[in-house]
Image (spheres, rainbow, N blue to C red):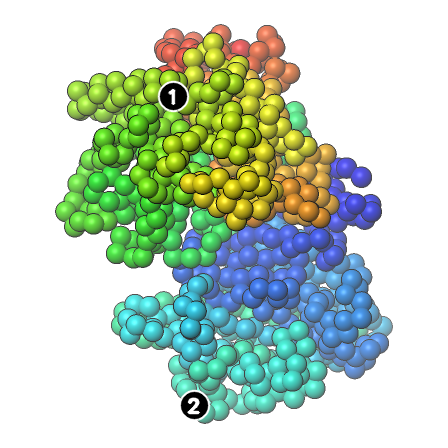
Amino acid sequence: MMNNREIYGSSGEKWAQFRPDCAGIDLYTLNLPAPWEYIYQNHDVLLKVDQFGPVYAQANPPGGIQLFRRENGQRFSSWAVWLQSDEMEDGKPFTNFFRPLIDGSNPSKEPQDLKVTFLPHCASYEYRVQNLLVQTEFFVPLHGTEIVMKLHLKNVREKAIDLSVCPTFVPYVNPAQLAPWDKYEWYLKSGVGKDDKELFWSQLLSSTSDPGERRTAVLWTDSENLTGLEISYEKFVGSGDLSCPQTVTDGAYRMKPELTASFGEYRDDNSIWGYPPVYAAKYGCRLESGGERVFTQVLCMPPNTANGGLPAIEDVKKPLVYFESSVYEQKKEEVQDSFKALCRKNKVRTGQEDWDYFINNWLPLQMEWVASLDRGWPTAMRGTRDCAQDYTAMLSIDTAIGRVRLLEMLSCQRSDGWFPRQFSTEGRTGRHDLRGHVDAGAFVIEFVYEYLSYSGDTGVLDVTLPWLDSDGESTVLEHLTRALDYYMVPENLGEHGLCKIGEGDWLDSVNRAGVLGRGESVMVSEQVVMCLQYLAEILESGDIRAEKAAVYREKAEELKKNLLEHAVNQDGFFNGIFTDEGKWIFSDKDPDGEKRPYGPANWFALISGVVPREKRDSVLRVMEMLKCEAGYRLYWPPMGASPINCVGRAASGDAPAGFAENGNVYNHGAQGFLTRALAAVGDGDALFDTLKWLLPYDQTRHPSSVTLSAPYAIVNCWQELPVFKFRSLFSFLTGSVGMAQRAVYEWMFGIRPALDGLVIDPCIPKWMNTANVEFTYLGRRVKMEIKNSGVRCCTPEKVELNGNVAVKTRKDPFHSRTVFVLEKELFQDGENTLRVIL
C-alpha cells in the first residue's frame, strides 16, 4: 500500500501514521526494519530517541559531554525501567519499552496496543500487558540540561497487583571519543545519596589535571516506596548483562535505601570509582484496580564551581521542580508553543497537501536539529563548510545564531586566508582538523554575503578577530578578502588557471587528486566565480575599496574564461577534476575508459553563471545521464572497478560501488545543488520534481520498506548496495536539510535577500497556478501570493508590495534574468502584502 500519511510495510502491515497538525508521528510496531530516530534539543542538551527508547544524550552539543549512550550493537536503551510481578502470567521482567525480553524465544513478540509517539515537545511510549497500562514520556525543556522521564502505570485489571519497579540508568559522562587506551569509568567518581529525594551523581575528572574539563551529571529519582539501590554496574548485572541483569531477575539489590550520605559525600557504602557505575533503584508498588502511579526521574548536568568543584547544592536541586505535575505541564506547554512559533516563521500553501505539510512542519524542525547536531557527529569539531551551509539555510529562521557561527569560523581562519576542514567547538585554541581541503573558504564567503543580506548587520564587517596562527586581530572584512585572495595567488592556481584542489574539495572521497600540488577543482573554481561577485558587491555597497571590487569582477571573468576553455569536454559537459597525474576525471573519457559525468561540477557551472545561455542544454543533458529509480545520482558509473591513480579512495577500490558518494543518489550534492541549478535556468517543473526526490516522505518514490528509514527523515543518500538497494544512509546528518530549506524558499519561491533589498525571483512549476508563502524579512512579516495564470515558471511581469507597483529591476549577475528588487525601506512595520504575477 502506498500512502504518504500512513506508512505500511511490504506485507501490508501498518507501521506508522503522521500526525496531521505538527511534525509528529505515531509508530505502531517495534519491528521496523531499522531504528527510526527523532531528536529533542535546546542547544544546552540533545536527546536522541528511537522506537526502543533513548539512544544517547549530550550536554552542550556537538562538542560536549555525552551523558549516556548505547554502544554499538546495543539495541535496548541504557535508560529504562524494569517491571515485574509474580501475579502476571509468566512472572518474567520486562521493560517500559517492552524490550529487551528475558525470554528471547520470539524476538518479534510485541505487546498489546503499542503506540510510540514522537511529537516536537515530547516522546511517548505506551502499551498494555495483561491489563497493565505502561506509558513513558521523555521531555527536554526550552533551556537547561535537564531531561525528564515520567513513567505512568495504570492497573485496569479487576483486582490489585503488586509490582517491582526498577529504573536503571547507565551513565557514560565522558567525551564522545576517548583515546584508544582509555576507559570511560576511569575518570568517573560516582555516588548515591539523599537531599530531599534520592539522587545519583557522577563526577567526571580531568585526565590532564585541567579543572575546566571537569563535569558533573546528576540523576534525581523518587523516594516513595524505595526498597533497594545499586551503584556498581558489575554488581547490578551479575552473571547476566544489561539485557538480563541478575539483580532484576532475583530482586536482590545490594544496597538499602537508608543512606544518610548527601550529595558529594563519598563513603565505602555509597560510591564507586575506577569501575563502571550504574544508577539502579527498586520500588515496591501496589496498584489497586483502577489505580495509577507516576514515577519521575530527572537527568541533568548542573554547572561546576569556577575551580571545577562539584556544583552548588542549590543548582543541583533546581530540577526537583519537574517532580511537580503542574510545573511539568507548564514547561511542556512552553516547548509546544515554541515549536508552533518555529513553524510559523515560514509557511507555504500550494495545494499539494502532503508537500505543504512536510515543508511547514518537518523541514523547520530538522533545520533546528541539524544546527545543533552539526551533521550528527557528537565530537568537539564542526565541519567548516558544513557549518557554513547549514547556517546559511538557518538564516531564514534565525539570523542571531548565524552571527555567532560566522565569528567562530572566522576566528579559526589561518592568516593566509585558508580555513580548516573542521574547527574546534572550543575555539581557535582547540584541536582542529587541518587536512588540506580547500573548499571551505568559498562556502564561508557565501554564508557571510547571505548573512549580511538577511540581517542587514553591516557592522559585523568592522568586528576584529584573531587568526588561527596569529593573535593579531583584523576586521571581518579583511578576513573575507584574505579568504578570497587565497584562491587567487599564483601558487594556488593550476596550469589551466583553475583553483588547485589540494587534499580535497566538496567531494570527500576524492582525497588524492592534488596532494602533489598539480590537481585542480572545477567546482571550487566555479564557487570562486560566485564569491568574487559576492565580495565585489559587499565592497561596492559600502563604498569601500572600489578598486578591489573592480579587480574581483575582472578575476571572475578570467576564471569563467578558463573554465570554458579548459574544463568543457567534447561531449559538451564539464569535467570535474584535473589530477596530479595530468588527467581529467569525471569527464567524457576517464582514465579507466568510462564516460563519467559528475553533477556538482555541472550544476555549479549553471549556478555561477559560467555557462552561456546557448550552451546550457548540453550541460543539462547530464541530468539524463544521472537519472535512476531513486532520483539523480552524484556521478555515474561508480569508480573503483579499474583503479585510477591520483584520485583517492573513490577510485582505488576502497569505497565500494554504491556506498556513500560512490555512484549514488547523494541528496546534498546530487539533488540539492541540482535544484539550485534548475532555478538558475528557470525550469520550475524539474526543480519541484527534483525536490520531491530529495525529500523522504513520498512513499511512491522512497517507500520506507525500501529505504528502511523514517519517512520524515531527510537523509544523506539512497545507496545501491547488494541486499539493500536504495536503502538510505544517515538520517538528519546531512547537508540535504539545508539544501531543501533553501530550495523551497530561495530558489523555488524566489525569496532572496540581497544587500540592497529583497530580490523576487520565483521559479515554480508551470502547473502551479497559485502559491502563498509567509516569511519574515528584516523583522517584518510578509504574506506573498504568486499568481501564475500564464502557465510560466519564472520572470514575473508585475510585483506589488502593499498595493504599490514595484519599479526597480536588474539583471541577475548569475542567470541574467530580470528580477525585481524591493528596497528595504519599502517594507512597513507589522504585516506586508506582496503580490507576484508571472
Which label's residue is closer to the chain start, 1 or 2?
2
- Residue 415 image point, x, y percent: 20, 43
Q: Is residue 355 above or below residue 463?
A: above
Q: Is residue 588 above or below residue 271?
A: above
Question: Which label is found at residue 507?
Answer: none
Q: In this rendering, does residue 145 appear at all?
A: no
Seen at 80% across and 71% down, the residue is 105
Q: Which residue is mark 1?
A: 566
* Mark 2 secondary-structure assignment: loop
Alpha carbon separation for disc pair 1 and 2: 74 Å
Q: Quadrant of residue 409?
A: top left
Neighbour tally class for label 1: few under 14, some 14-19, many 20 plus, Cα within 10 Å: some
Tag 1: amino acid? His
Q: Which residue is mark 2?
A: 267
Residue sitting at the far bottom: 268
Please state which of residues 289 and 131 is positioned toward the viewer in this rendering. 131
Give the number of marks.
2
Tag 2: amino acid? Arg
Q: In this rendering, does residue 241 appear at all?
A: yes
Please state which of residues 288 and 439 is positioned toward the viewer in this rendering. 439
817 with respect to 305 (left or right): right
650 with respect to 496 (left or right): right
Which quadrant would the N terminus be assigned to in this image? top right
758 with respect to 243 (left or right): left
Seen at 66% across and 57% down, the residue is 51
- Residue 286 image point, x, y percent: 72, 79
Please state which of residues 197 and 514 is positioned toward the viewer in this rendering. 514
Give the label, 1 or 2, closer to the camera: 1
